[in-house]
Image (cartoon, rainbow, N blue to C red):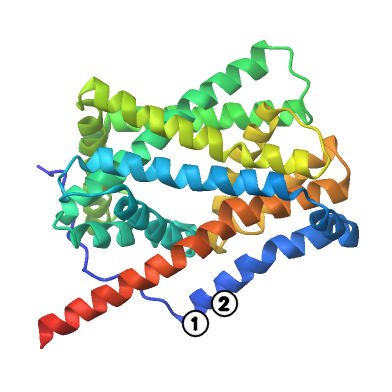
Amino acid sequence: MLSPRTAEPRRTLPRWRPLHGLLIVLALIAPLLVTAWLGGIEALEGVKRFPLDVVGLMVLIAFLCWNLNAARLRLMLNGRAGHLGQFRALSIELASKFALCATPGGSGGPPTLLVLLSQRGLPASRGAAVFLLDQGCDLLFFLCMLTGLVAFSLLGETQWPHQALIQLALVALALLATGVTLVMAYLPRLLRYSASPGARWLSGHRRRWLARRLLTCRHALQATLRLPVPTLLAMLGLTTAHWLLRYSLLYLAVLGAGGHADWLWTFLTQMLAMAASQFSFLPGGAGAAELGVGGLLLPLMEREQAAAAVLVWRLVSYHLYLAAGAPLFLLSAFRLVQRRSSAQT
């Protein structure tokens, strides 16, 4: 019988190759290219006229979001990685988020988090459970928001642009989320069925690899639901505050660019665009995220206003993460190399 376990990762941060540097450069210049294509020179002029007080408020909100995530990390660890102050938790948060934003598909984020936690004495299996717990809180928040948005779009008197397309996308996301939930609920039965001779569409090695990871995820979600109610509510409260604040950045960017849009529309725009950005090969979904948000904003404002709003939004919500997390990631990598050299000598 398969047991829910996680393989111990190698105690090293993700290796960086010249291709990674090229992808990061492309991700950095993608917002400028999209801005120039959408709004031209007028959009760049609009960025120059963007109110500095709005930019300052957006940066303050981003800093607050980082600290909310750090507080949630401290709550999830609950002393299992030694005494973890807010500044140290913030360093781990920013370093792991830098690796997440700087690699295609965010592939570097989980290994970085596991290594940083292992340096504090937390085994990799428990570190993986902490990561899955973090993802489970995010998933629960978006499931609730998605359910509310679907009900509001179908039952309410909404006047959104591309109404039919938006409703179709929301229903598709809701069905996908429901399918994932059902798979997790009936996973043991599905695994037994997949092992039958008539349903072996995967090789034995790949089937065991997939089963181990699915069971690990299911085990982590079950552990999440068994948490004390006050702890679970506190984690969900921090998660809700983080995403509501972070998804308000686009709304502020639209206002600063001189446009007008409902906060709910900007929230929905970001959720759909970030889902579409998963198909981009560039780090952080660069290119796809800007085009998705810009395309959904165009019906509500001028092209140059939409382009300026998208550029400022990405600078605060993505590039600022890279700028703040890069020094901490490099410092963590230096300390790890220094520690390994000391151990060898």
Q: Is residue 220 visible?
A: yes
Q: Position of residue 78 (x, y in %)?
A: 19, 39
Q: Closest to the observer: 186 or 170?
A: 170
Residue at the location (63% across, 43% down)? 57
Q: Classify 148 as above or below 284.
A: above
Tell me the distance, in whole angstroms, between the alpha carbons under discs 1 and 2.
6 Å
How many circles with numbers are drawn on the protein?
Answer: 2
Which label sits on residue 89?
none
**Residue occupying the point 26% across, 38% down:** 75
Figure quadrant of residue 8:
bottom left
Q: Quadrant of the C terminus?
A: bottom left
Amino acid type, callout 2: Leu
Dot 1 falls on a residue whose secondary structure is: helix
Pointer 1 with pointer 2, Cβ within 8 A: yes
* Residue hosting label 1: 18
Q: Which residue is mark 2?
A: 22
Left or right of 218, for residue 297: right
Type of amino acid under label 1: Pro
Q: Is residue 202 above or below residue 1?
A: below
Q: Residues within 10 Å of mark 1 (few under 14, many from 20)?
A: few
